[in-house]
Amino acid sequence: MDDFLTTAVRTLFPGLLVLCVAATTGRRESHGVDSIVVPCVKPKTICDPHYTSPFRGKIIGGEVADPGSTPWLVSLQDTQFKQPVHFCGATLLNIVWVLTSANCVTGYSYPYETLQVVLGEYDMEEVEGWERMRAVSVIVIHPDYDPFSHANDMALIKIHSPVLYNERIRPMNLPPYRNDDDFHPNPTNHYNCWNHDFDLDNVDEQSLDDVWHVITGWGRTAEASDMSSVVMKATVPLLSQDECAAAYPSIPFTQSMICAGNLTYGGLDPCQGDWGGPLVSSGGYIRGVSSWGVGCGRPGLPAIYTDVAKYNNWICDIIH
């Protein structure tokens, strides 16, 4: 883990020491009784040039997703190893733009030679013919992103060449427009930011607060477990702002954050390898970007997501 991030987490959470499970390099840094799991930024180079990373981890409490059921899901991979290494998830927004967590990409700088975006991926151990690899041309990190508090933990990636849609590659819609408590189901100034087959006029504000949402990815099944090669999914309940703040009383839980998970039993959570991936609403749009959590699937400690609905203007201004 980069030094600045380690320091930031320790400053925020006294008594919690960092658990940065480097699934991409097979290393884990843990030196305390309790731990916080955050995205490991750019995988660190190790000495063996022939190193091959096994895929480890899947969503806590998840099940195998059907092939083709998550066409918006994107794998971010580092290519500095013998084989490309998955380290974060992302969401396809249109033919050239991908949405992810800022924490996933802060370790990369132009020209992003070791960062690869893979679309149409399902089973990382098989070449199925649907996969499309793209180089990165631009990374836009939210200007107010704070690595110390994880506020505004969001980034946009522009791929080098457009991707063609097919049954395994399709974009995910942004949420209905909400800004300062004003609800506009179909804002005319950003109409082209949404897919035209998504009927925003029939999506009401209440759908932003739907209880059940779906998380997907290739992350861990437990804090020290291995990854799945195939996409996993889990259905999680969205919690209220008061419940989120109560779960983390010593953490500055901002209005840009939402949380989801089972407070009583735990067991439903993204984990290492899932960060940056989408929290998808039953209404058919991305509700959150997986940001951070304490442990993985622990009772009383839900996962934290960046609230995408608060960033529609920022996203649309960039991608259109």
Image: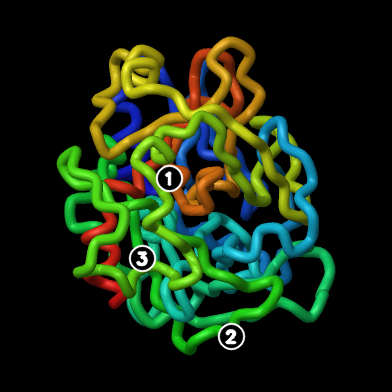
Q: Position of residue 238 (x, y in %)?
A: 48, 29
Which residue is the site of mark 2? Answer: 164
Label 3 or label 2, whichever comes before in sequence order:
3
Give the CA distance from mark 3 to mark 1.
14 Å
Which residue is the site of mark 1? Answer: 288
- Circle 3 SS class: strand
Q: Is residue 3 at all visible to an observer of this figure?
A: yes
Label for residue 113? none
Amino acid on which disc 1 is placed: Gly
Mark toward the viewer: 3 or 2: 2
Q: In the image, is 251 to the left or to the right of 28? A: left
Sort mark 1 into few (<14), some (14-19) or many (20+) by Cα contacts within 10 Å: many
Colouring mode (rainbow / by chain / secondary structure / one colour): rainbow
Q: Which of 216 and 273 is in front in this view?
A: 216
Q: Nearer the viewer, residue 209 or 317?
A: 209
Q: Is residue 36 at all visible to an observer of this figure?
A: no
Label for residue 156? 3
- Circle 1 SS class: strand
Q: Where is residue 187 in the image (x, y as percent from the top left)?
A: 24, 61
Name the residue at the bottom extreme: 161
Vertical position of residue 29 compared to residue 84: above or below:
above
Determine the residue positioned at 43% across, 30% down: 259
Name the residue at the front extreme: 202
Q: Position of residue 89 (x, y in %)?
A: 55, 56
Q: In the image, is 169 to the left or to the right of 283? A: right
Label 3 or label 1, whichever comes before in sequence order:
3
Give the CA distance from mark 3 to mark 2.
19 Å
Give the CA distance from mark 2 to mark 1.
25 Å
Q: Quadrant of the C terminus?
A: bottom left
Q: In which quarter of the image is residue 85?
A: bottom right
Q: In the image, is 306 to the left or to the right of 260? A: left
Amino acid on which disc 3 is placed: Leu
